[in-house]
């Protein structure tokens, strides 16, 4: 009886030792697996971070490629535009248009954007009084943008030289609340019968008096009820912005400082 009880206790001790050993081994295995799992997770996180960094770098390179492609496209279009302008000048023989003995008074530049009907009205208004003195006032149309109707309308006239300005840069206003339209806009107007006579007569003033910035044919208050002498010239420190003439010297000085909005019209 005593021997049997001892045998049972020995078996229990052995079983307990085996159980403890198994638990220790299981814990060690679980710890090792947990360490391996943590290492794998860290490796996966590193791979994910590297993958995201690589994707960001690829995106940046793609953005640079798109920018370069747009710049090259713009240069190609500008080159094509210059070639078209040169061909147009050769076709129309600008030297003959200006004349060999008569010096031009000023170039007439009509600025347009996206309104072919207004452009046509302005051109017809100018040609009405310009045809007989075309050698003194050679006519140009300068288009902002790519409106095909405006280009077709301008190119339909043999009496003028057409130019196009392409600008694909995003517009950033200088002051809050400003309309983007002010940065790419062209106003149209009709001219008076004495438009060219007026500028030919006042051109001498620009040459003689260097304190005059520009001569303008526009007066916001030029209505009959306000004008007492239709032959009088008024000197003002306010720039009207419409229908004006200045010298090349003044333009070379002002053009680098010209604001992006409210363009030369």
Image (cartoon, grey):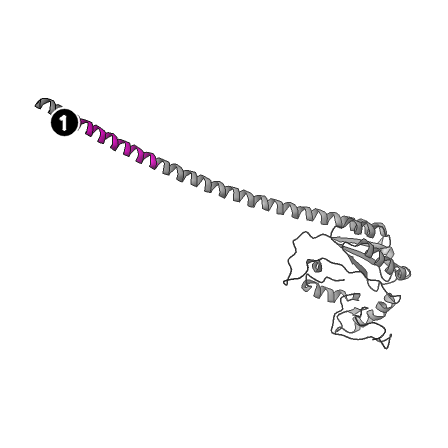
Above/below status of 65 relative to 29: below
Which sits in the foreground, 84 or 264? 264
Name which quarter of the figure residue 109 lies in: bottom right
The answer to whether residue 14 is above or below residue 226 is above
Residue 15 inside the magenta-drawn segment:
yes
The span shown in magenta is 9-35
Task: Confirm whether the magenta stretch covers residue 125.
Answer: no
Q: Quadrant of the N terminus?
A: top left
Q: Name the secondary structure under disc 1.
A: helix
Q: Residues within 10 Å of mark 1 (few under 14, many from 20)?
A: few
Res. 99 in view: no
Q: Point out the image quarter for the C terminus.
A: bottom right
4 sits left or right of 193 in the view: left
The secondary structure making up most of the magenta span is helix
Estimate the x, y position of residue 220 in percent, counting from the top left: 79, 70
Q: Is residue 187 above or below residue 214?
A: above
- Badge 1 is on which residue? 9
Residue 107, how many percent across, how many down? 81, 61
Could you say where residue 81 lies in the image, as x and y percent from the top left? 75, 49
């Amino acid at each position: 009886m005593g021997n049997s009880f001892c045998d049972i206790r020995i078996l229990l001790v052995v079983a307990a030792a085996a159980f403890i050993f198994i638990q220790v081994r299981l814990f060690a295995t679980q710890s090792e697996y947990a360490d391996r799992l943590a290492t794998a997770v860290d490796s996966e996180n590193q791979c994910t971070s590297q993958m995201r960094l690589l994707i960001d770098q690829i995106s940046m390179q793609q953005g640079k490629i798109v920018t370069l492609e747009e710049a090259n496209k713009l240069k190609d279009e500008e080159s094509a535009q210059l070639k078209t302008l040169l061909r147009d000048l050769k076709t129309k023989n600008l030297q003959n248009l200006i004349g060999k003995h008569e010096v031009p008074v000023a170039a007439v530049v009509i600025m347009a954007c996206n309104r072919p009907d207004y452009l046509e009205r302005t051109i017809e208004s100018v040609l009405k009084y310009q045809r007989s003195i075309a050698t003194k006032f050679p006519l140009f149309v300068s288009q902002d943008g790519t409106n095909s109707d405006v280009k077709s309308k301008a190119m339909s006239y043999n009496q003028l030289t057409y130019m196009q300005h392409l600008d694909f840069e995003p517009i950033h206003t200088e002051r809050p609340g400003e309309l983007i339209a002010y940065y790419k806009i062209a106003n149209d107007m009709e001219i008076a019968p004495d438009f060219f006579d007026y500028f030919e007569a006042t051109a001498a003033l620009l040459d003689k008096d260097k304190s005059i910035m520009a001569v303008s044919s526009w007066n916001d208050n030029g209505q009959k009820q306000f004008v007492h002498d239709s032959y009088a010239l008024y000197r003002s420190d306010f720039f009207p912005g419409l229908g004006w003439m200045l010298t090349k010297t003044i333009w070379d000085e002002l053009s680098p400082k010209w604001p992006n909005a409210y363009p030369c019209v």
